Image (tube, rainbow, N blue to C red):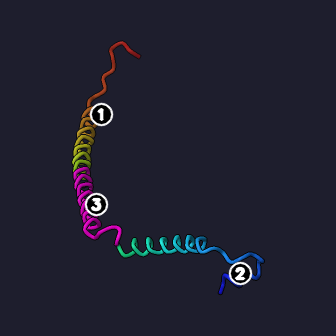
Amino acid sequence: MLAVAFAATTGEGIPSVWNLSLLGGLVGLLVFISISVMRGWFIPSRTHERELAQERKRADEWKAVADERKKTINSLIVQNTAMLEATKTTVSVVQSLPVSTPEGGS
């Protein structure tokens, strides 16, 4: 009915069946693919769960590495603090030494 109304307004003949079926087939295929992806028919749940498990494993590995780095950084901070304290002690000892002037100097 729509094709007849279209043909009457444009002055063209009724579109062929092949032109209509190609467009309908493409739209149908697009709708089928969209529904299949949304419902998970193309990606089985086992595959999805396996990928999620691998992601969690990688995340746990990265977290372990980050924790080790934090421990290393904290130990370096403690060591640097001890070295700074030793430097302060050395500076105070050197400053407490008497200043000697060379004999015959001005």
- The residue beneath circle 3 is 55
- The residue beneath circle 2 is 6
> Hey, which quadrant is residue 5 in on the image?
bottom right
> Hey, which quadrant is residue 102 in on the image?
top left
- State the residue at coordinates (35%, 72%): 40
The one of 49 and 1 positioned closer to us in this rendering: 1
Residue 71, how many percent across, how many down?
A: 22, 52
Q: Amino acid at mark 1?
A: Gln
Regarding mark 1 in the picture, which secondary structure is present there?
A: helix
Contact (Cβ within 8 Å) of mark 1 with mark 2:
no
For marks 1 and 2, give the CA distance.
103 Å
Crowd band around label 3 with a 10 angstrom C-alpha radius: few (<14), some (14–19), many (20+): few
2 above or below 28?
A: below
Q: Earlier in the sequence, mark 1 or mark 2?
A: 2
The boundaries of the magenta stretch are 41-69
- The residue beneath circle 1 is 95
Mark in the foreground, 1 or 2:
2
Regarding mark 3 in the picture, which secondary structure is present there?
A: helix
For marks 2 and 3, give the CA distance.
54 Å
Q: Amino acid at mark 2?
A: Phe
> Hey, which quadrant is residue 9 in on the image?
bottom right
- State the residue at coordinates (69%, 83%): 4
Q: Main secondary structure of the magenta part?
A: helix
77 above or below 48?
A: above
Where, quadrant-wise, is the C terminus in this rendering?
top left
For marks 1 and 3, give the CA distance.
59 Å
